[in-house]
Image: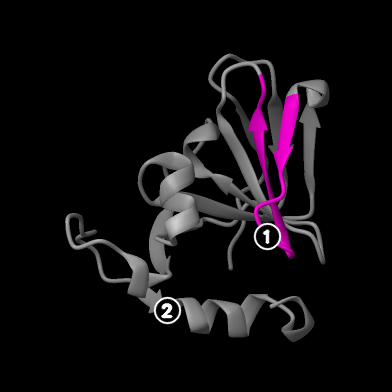
Amino acid sequence: MSNLNVANGSCLCGAVSMSTTSMSNHLGACHCSMCRKWGGGPLLVIECGSDVSFSGEENIGFYQSSEWAERGFCNKCGSHLFYKLKQNNQYFMPVGLFDNGEDLILDHQLFIDEKPKYYCFANATKNLTGAEVFAQFIPPSSK
């Protein structure tokens, strides 16, 4: 995984801004029913590790979407800010929040078995089913 130097971004209204030095240049699409319900379509995210800092934290709302993860959003404009694994504070952040994204590569799709037939990405990617995602990322005691 290759990293960009520093990535800065913000929500739609600017009440929350973020910075990370651990942003991967590998973009993923999640097709799970929760992500699609949350954003109205696939969630296009960048893995940012745990090195993420926020300003305007008082404007961040949290939703405990599962035993192992929470989702953050701006409570002013509603922008989706992150999907975070609780076990290791690993952030997956919507790519559209960031200012510098020219060198990003869409190279993997998660929950491919839940992807509706009405859309399709043109480039070849690594595809993981929901079971494969759980086996890779979620500790067995949390499932």
Residue 63 in the magenta stretch? The answer is yes
Q: Residue at x 39, y 66 (%)?
A: 107
Q: Disc 1 designates what residue?
A: 66
Segment tinted magenta in the rendering:
60-75
111 relative to 61, above or below: below
Rendered location of residue 76, percent (x, y)? 64, 16
Image quarter (top left, top right, bottom left or bottom right) of the N terminus: bottom right
* Residue 41 in view (yes/no): yes
Say the numbered circle drawn on residue 129.
Answer: 2
Q: Position of residue 125 (x, y in %)?
A: 33, 71
Q: Main secondary structure of the magenta part?
A: strand
In contact (CB < 8 Å): disc 2 and disc 1? no
What amino acid is at disc 1? Ser
- Asked if residue 22 is positioned above or below residue 16 in the image, the reply reads below
Q: Secondary structure at mark 2?
A: loop
* Nearest to the observer: residue 63 or residue 1: 63
Q: Earlier in the sequence, mark 2 or mark 1?
A: 1
Q: Is 117 situated left or right of 10 in this image?
A: left
Q: Quadrant of residue 75?
A: top right
In whole angstroms, how far apart are the C-alphas of marks 2 and 1? 18 Å
**Depth check, front residue: 1 or 14:** 14
**Camera sees residue 28:** no
